[in-house]
Amino acid sequence: MKILLLFEIFTALSNAQVQITCEYEFKDFSIPDGPIYACKILNDIQDLSYENRDVIEVHGVHLPNKNDGDIKGIWTENNYHLTYFPRKLTKRFSNLKVIHYNKSRFLILLEIYISFSSAQIEITCHYEFISLPLFDHQIYTCSIFSNVTNVTYKTRDITAMKGQHLPGKTNDDVKGFLSDRNKIIYPVHKLTKYFKNLEAIKHRQTYLVDITNEDFEEFATKLVYLQISKSYLEKIQKDLFIYNPNLKGIDLSNNRIIKFDPKVFDSLRNLEYLTVEGNTCIKKQNYDTNDVAKVINQIKSQCSDISKFVILFT
């Protein structure tokens, strides 16, 4: 008898067809809109994996005079095998405004409320000087502490920037951007529209679940330090830093990363500082953060093969 034991997750790594069954109802999500027409997922979704989570079929009978276009919310609770967020929901429900995932048995799915509308994304900066690795002096930074909850995959361009600069300072003096203890799920875009001289990005204790090279393209060669720590990242792709060849420091510690592409750091000739400790595939970093070559070798050894997180007992 073979038993699959997956670290922290229990999910099938197969080419499964993801189907959901809805019970349609009106539900109060405690948002200003009041009760909204929503799909409650009834089935226990067991065939979801990181690579295979596009919803291809939805079952259920609408309330009278209602259709898919009326759905503004989707939610589930006690869905014990649901370990990743289903995708392609808006292909069926184009007017989604709220997603509510309650806690599951094996992997905590944070209760999140996501706006899918064309929201105005306004950020209020607390301007300050902060210290970061590799900088021999404190850098002038826009720090945001209030939750930016209306950022979605399709809607994350900043439309307004607020905040009072320190005396004698302007947007041109801002070298750092800090998001701390924020429920932001995707990195915001168009920061350089306001801060053209950004050199450092720091996200700490956020809900960030996925990043791509497009999230850092606007910073180009000026970006020298990137930190995304104590968040929910799971995979690091090969071309993540393709637009940022001058990166000198990277901190991806304390996420849920199960895989690094082995070539992700190949283009970073100036890398001096690297920490990835506290992830699923690399709980403890064996080398100092400045011993970059050895840290990269440890990553390649421990974090290049997802199959290492499946143990077979016979």
Image (cartoon, helix red, strand yellow):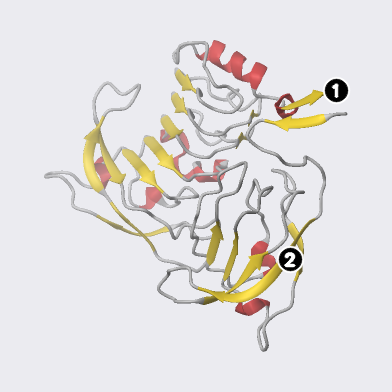
Give the secondary structure at mark 2: strand
Hey, what amino acid is under mark 1?
A: Thr
Q: In the rendered image of this protein, does residue 306 appear above or below residue 95? A: above
- Look at the image and tell me whether residue 86 can be seen: yes
The circle drawn on residue 190 is none
| Residue at image location 80% in from the left, 30% down from the top | 3
The residue wearing badge 1 is: 314
* Whether residue 140 is situated above or below residue 97 in the rendered picture: above
Return the residue nearer the eye: 271 or 20.
Answer: 20
State which quarter of the image contains the N terminus.
top right
Distance CA(mark 2)–CA(mark 1): 35 Å
Circle 2: residue type = Thr
Q: Which residue is mark 2?
A: 21
Q: Secondary structure at mark 1?
A: loop
- Toward the viewer: 216 or 48? 48
Q: Position of residue 19 (x, y in %)?
A: 77, 60
Measuring from the top left, give residue 105's x and y in whole percent. Answer: 61, 45
Q: Quadrant of the C terminus?
A: top right
Indicate the position of residue 64 as horizontal and vertical percent values.
68, 88
Residue 49 x %, y %: 72, 44
